[in-house]
Image: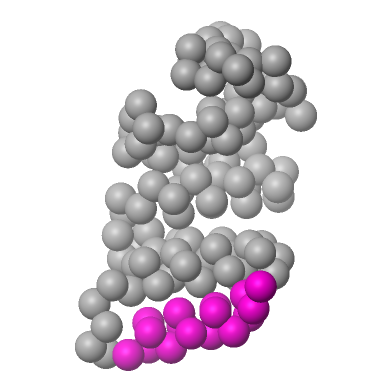
Amino acid sequence: GQYQEAENYFLRAVAEPSYINTAAAYENAGLCATLIPNWQKAGYYFEQALAKDPNRANSLYELSRIKARQHHPLQAQRYLNRYFNLAGSRASKAALQLAYKLAHQLHQKQKAQEYAKLLKQRFPQHSSTLKRG
C-alpha cells in the first residue's frame, strides 16, 4: 500500500546507470502511479517503458485504460490493438471487455460483435458482464 515509496524506488533504479531493466522499472512505477492514482504520471511512465521496450504488453494495456479514462477512445483502441498483437490468445478478459466498450463508443458494431464473441468463447462464465460503458 506504499505506492509513492515504491514509485520512488523504481525511479531510483532507472537513474542507476548500471541498471539494465529500465523498461520494467518504468512499467512498475506506472503501476504504482495508477494505484495512487495519478493518471498523468502513470501514462508518462508507461510511455517511457514502451520507449525502452516496445513489446511491453502490460504497458500497452495500461495506456489503453488511461486513454479510455481520459475520453480518448481512438487512442485507447490503438494501444489496445498493439496489446492484442503481442498478447494474442493470452489477451486478458479485462482487455477484451475494454475493446468491446471502445468499439461501441466508436460505433464499430462489427468489431464489438467480434469482441463479444471472443469473450463468450474464452470466458463463457462471464459473458453476461458485457457492458457498453
Q: Is residue 87 visible?
A: yes
In the foreground, 116 or 93: 93
Viewed as shown, does residue 18 lie left or right of 72? left
Position of the N terminus, as image quadrant, is: bottom right
Q: Quadrant of the C terminus?
A: top right
* Residue 117 position in % (x across, y down): 53, 10
User: Is residue 91 depicted above or below 16 in this figure?
Assistant: above
What percent of the width, then of the height, locates residue 59? Answer: 45, 54
Residue 22 image position (x, y, % from top left): 33, 74
Q: Is residue 129 above or below residue 36?
A: above
Q: What residue is shown at x 37% (from left), y 59% (from top)?
A: 50
Residue 65, placed above or below residue 12: above
Which quadrant holds residue 31? bottom right
Nearer the observer, 90 or 83? 90
Is residue 126 positioned above or below 43 on the image?
Answer: above
- Residue 16 % position (x, y): 32, 90
Query: Which residue is pictured at 60% across the width and 17% down the height?
Result: 125
In the picture, measured across the screen, residue 114 lies left or right of residue 18, that is right
Q: Does residue 38 appear in the picture of this structure? A: no
Residue 38 on the magenta span: no
Q: Which residues are magenta?
A: 1-16
- Camera-side residue: 127 or 95? 127
